[in-house]
Amino acid sequence: MRIAAVDIGTNTILLLIADVDDNGNIHLLDHQQQFPRLGSNVDGSQIINPEIFDKVASIINDYKTISHNLRVDSFIVCATSAVRDAANQNIFLDFIESECGCKIMVLSGKEEAELTFLGGTSGFRFPPEETVVLDIGGGSTEITQYISGELKGESLQIGAVRLTERFFLHSPPTNLEIKSAKEDIAAHLSLIQNPPSSLKFVVGVAGTLTTLACLAQGIKHFQIEKIRGYHLSPRNVDLWTATLLSLVPTEILKLSDATIGRVDIIGTGALILDEMIKKFGFQDIIVSERGLRHGMVLKEWKIKSELE
């Protein structure tokens, strides 16, 4: 079964096209990413800027064309934090439906977390009950794990775009700005109902994690085969957090093309991860290049398979 999944995030709009075989294994055909930053200033204004509507519609239509040319069986679109939070959510959704002819499913934080767990762990052989998945996004951060045999996802209102806009008025940020961001992260982490165990396998997904994996290995050009399964140590993360928060975007861009589209927020994403490691005592973060889109594909495959 061939499925296309589009993830409309706060910073990126991502496309995955994959074949899923009878055993539920994902075989990548194409993936694309664009950085319209749909969620710019949503934290402050509570609305998606109408000026970006056309850009988003253009990206989705481009993705539809790519998907049509590859003869997909299903084309599904989901939106996360920025659209979830926006007061003009319905206006945006109606516009995209009229311009692109597709409906967007707005995921709750819990739904996003659980689909990300499904996608982020696919292909790994870690026991699900012994695995925690961390997803640091632009607008929110999700932590998902099994509790008493049931998958539980928690979504926190801390993300790389959100905290950058909220606290970092200078580039690089001042020590006082970093301190304020750390306090906000700590306050949100204290709200977690089921603190993850440091004894579990910890899998990290999304752009902050994959970018840090590139930087830690000195990779100038993104290479999936060197990202998947890479182990980030607490020392790696701590050192790179301090480095990224001391540089201006032009300096960050020179480190690796993996930073494209997130040069001004990657330091904030690293800070969130660094504070989570310190809070929960994680000893090792295993990076997955898979995530929400892969979970969307697997869920769609299961639904379609059950109908056949």
Image: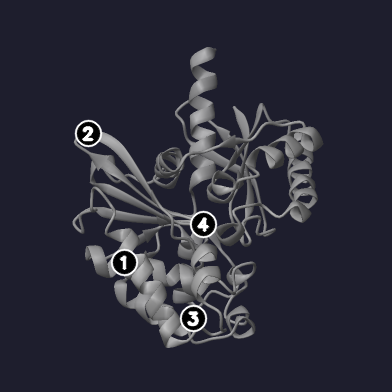
Q: Quadrant of residue 279?
A: bottom left
Q: Is residue 131 above or below residue 149?
A: below
Say which amino acid is labelled 2.
Gly
Query: Which circle marks residue 139 in the picture?
Result: 4
Q: Give me the disc on residue 149.
A: 2
Q: Residue at x 59, y 76 (%)?
A: 256
Which residue is pictured at 45% across the width and 57% down the height? 228
Find numbered disc 4 in the image and state the secondary structure of the residue it sits on: loop
Which one is nearer the viewer's eye here, 278 or 237?
278
In percent of width and height, residue 159 lies at 48, 61
Residue 186: which numbered mark, if any? 1
Q: Give coordinates of residue 110: x percent, y percent.
A: 40, 40
- Do the residues under discs 4 and 3 have CB atoms within 8 angstroms? no
The residue nearer to you, when weighing 195 against 181, is 181
Q: Amino acid at mark 3?
A: Leu
Q: Earlier in the sequence, mark 2 or mark 3?
A: 2
In the picture, measured across the screen, residue 169 lies left or right of residue 67, that is left
Residue at 49% from the left image edge and 67% from the top image edge: 163
Q: Position of residue 294 (x, y in %)?
A: 51, 41
Q: For residue 244, which numbered disc appears in the image?
A: 3
